[in-house]
Image (spheres, rainbow, N blue to C red):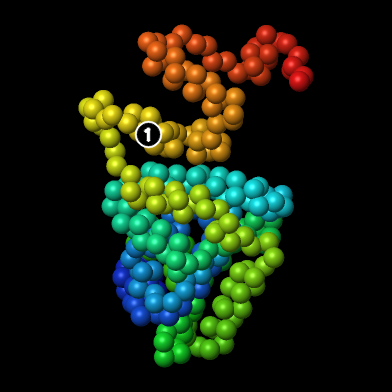
Amino acid sequence: MLRHSSRRQRLDSTVLAQRLAGAVAYDRIAGYFRSSLFEVAGEALSQVQGPIRIICNSDLDPQDLITAAAAQAALRRSWCAGKPEEAPPVALPRYKALYEALTNKRIEVRVLPDEAFGLIHGKAGVIRRADGAATAFLGSVNESASAWRLNYELLWEDDAPDTVAWVQEEFDALWNDARAMDLSVCPFIAQDVQRISNRRVIEPPQWKATTDTQTAAASAAVETPVYRREQGLWPHQKYFAQLALQRHRLGGARLVLADRWVWARRCNWPWPRY
């Protein structure tokens, strides 16, 4: 058994990178589902030659699992809640590696609703090598760069067969749970990763010089909270936005946008029925 402390050593370089180099499989109980889950995707995880499976929990409601459309919407909300669009420029190569790993199935992710087992606070992993050797670890480290590099974390590692089998059994129980949802059911996440990794910031002078202002406006709109947190605009909202843009192009527009619910409440009117 080995005991690791971030107070004594860099866990990402002395433990994670060394163990994953040349590994043929990596199963991980990672904690909470956020975009930070993949912050090491372009580095240590890229060294694994075989499949990487990550199980984590999320704020999904069991009702979100009833239909495919509801599941996609719920996963999208969970993903956007982590604000992956705020990733610093240095993270973009990792996002590119993540997109490739997600699309070619080198990384598979499943999420469990909190209702399944409560918060998955136990974090552990099993790493297997080509010669049949394996090691297991558990501790406070989640699958993020800050955990492996910056936080104070403790990690226990053991390659005893019974320990590896115990951690593997725990992983398999979570991974194969009927309530676990595969991230691949929500293509928006992989598409968003690709978009973030390929985007470029357009400054005002460049904006004015571009000829395709409509495409540029759409690209900027993807970053807005109303799109990322509320599933985009409703049809009547899209109609108003399109109308405002058309009127503006015709020489200016003077339009009033009001929420009828807020207006009714302020005027103490009953909620209109349709």
Identify residue type, mark 1: Thr
Secondary structure of residue under mark 1: helix
The foreground one among 18 and 219 is: 219
Judged left or right of residue 74, residue 38 is left
> Dividing the picture into quarters, in which one does residue 262 lie?
top right
> Dividing the picture into quarters, in which one does residue 223 lie?
top left
The foreground one among 24 and 156 is: 24
Residue drawn at (49%, 52%) of the image: 189
**Residue 4 in the image, given as x and y percentages of width and height:** 40, 74
Residue drawn at (23%, 31%) of the image: 206
Looking at the image, residue 31 lies above or below residue 62: below
**Number of marks in the image?**
1
The foreground one among 163 and 205 is: 205
**Residue 5 in the image, given as x and y percentages of width and height:** 38, 70
Residue that mark 1 sits on: 215
Looking at the image, residue 112 lies above or below residue 138: above
Residue drawn at (51%, 49%) of the image: 188
Q: Quarter of the image containing the C terminus?
A: top right
Q: Quarter of the image containing the N terminus?
A: bottom left
Judged left or right of residue 12, residue 56 is right
Residue drawn at (67%, 67%) of the image: 177
Q: In this orientation, does residue 126 appear? A: yes
Mark 1, other Cα within 10 Å: few <14 / some 14–19 / many ≥20: few
Judged left or right of residue 187, residue 44 is left
